[in-house]
Amino acid sequence: MKSIKHVAIAGAAACALANAASAEDYNGVNMIAIDDFIGTVEIKVGRGDRVSLNKTDGADADYPVIIDTDDGVLSIRSHEDPSDMDWWREVSWKKYKENAFTKFLEDYPTIRLTVPEGTDLQFVDTVMMLTAGDVNGHFDSGGHIEGAVGNLKSADVKIHGSADLVIGNVKEDLDISIHGSGDFRAGTAARLDAAIHGSGDIVTGKIAGPASARIHGSGDIEMGDVAGAGEFEIHGSGDIDAGALDGGADISIMGSGDISVASVNGETEVSIHGSGDSEIGSGRAENLHVRIHGSGEFEFRGTATNPDVVATSSGGIYVAKAEGDIRARGDGDIRIAGRDYSDDD
């Protein structure tokens, strides 16, 4: 049965009860869903199967918080999407500098939750400071969320703006996208899909499967070793750095970006349009295929099989060792296994 609790304090009572608190326990909850909300959220992992919620009002006790449960979902929300409120303009960035966001949140409620391990977390259109332990459930977030979260089962993170978020290890898939200048840090994951539109930064640990990374702008993406294929793409001046790729590589640069890989093992394809650079430290690139149009450069210090390369204009290609058939074309600087193929027809 659905229950709804409306929490709102108005008028003269607001001054006296600005820090009023309420607490409640819930059974049968497997997801926490927070929507259209501004505030601070703290989540701890408990030993039981109940969810405990404690709400403390901020300085603005008129800010409405609606709490309800339905079909295993504990929902916490307010009345309006924060982006429609132009909340950003209310933050005293110049006055409080790095503490401005925390100071801004003092006007809004603090929600403290204790949840069972495995509880899913979903935050949509939220502006909040978040701390959470090793929940080990699915994590789905969007909006401006700053803070730190522990280990998770899977994660789909969308950062809009300049928020900074840190999470622990992700057992399954990790999907992260940044639109703006936000920063994101994560531990290990089974699979990675990372994208930046702007100047954001993404750093992860080792990836147990394939990894995809895309940058439109000047952002940076860094990851550890990848136990699958790596698919990397830059449009602009961004940078991508990866450890060992144990499933080959598909590298594409349009602009002045840089892509560096510690080593590769598998089918490898590289395309550069512009002044970008790509470097692979070692390994074995099967059926290496390289195309450079512009002044970009590619360097591979491992062994390439059946290399097929083209460098036009002032582009440069260097391959340390080669096996099988070699095809090299273009008026760029091309050197394969100690031989100069420049202007070779």
Image: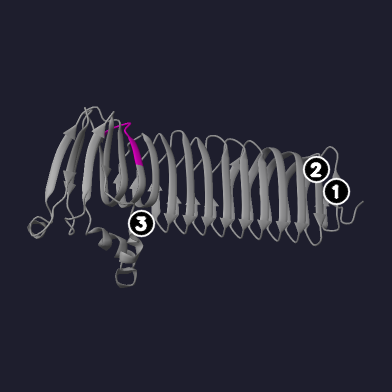
Q: In this view, does 59 lie above or below 65?
A: below
Residue 96 vs residue 301: left or right?
left
Question: Residue 54's mark?
Answer: none
What residue sits right under mark 3 in the picture?
84
Image location of residue 299, percent across then percent down: 72, 52
Q: Quadrant of residue 269?
A: top right
Amino acid type indicated by mark 1: Ala
Q: Mark 1 points at which residue?
A: 328
Give the class, few, some or many, for how many residues have Cα within 10 Å of label 2's Cα (few <14, many ≥20): many
Residue 219: percent from left, percent from top: 54, 57
First in residue order: circle 3 vs circle 1? 3
State the SS at label 2.
loop
Residue 162 x, y percent position in the rendering: 42, 59
Question: Which of 138/344 is in front?
Answer: 138
Q: Where is residue 175 in the image (x, y as percent from the top left)?
A: 48, 42
Asked if one can make out residue 126 in the rendered structure from this viewpoint, the answer is yes
195 relative position to 88: left or right: right
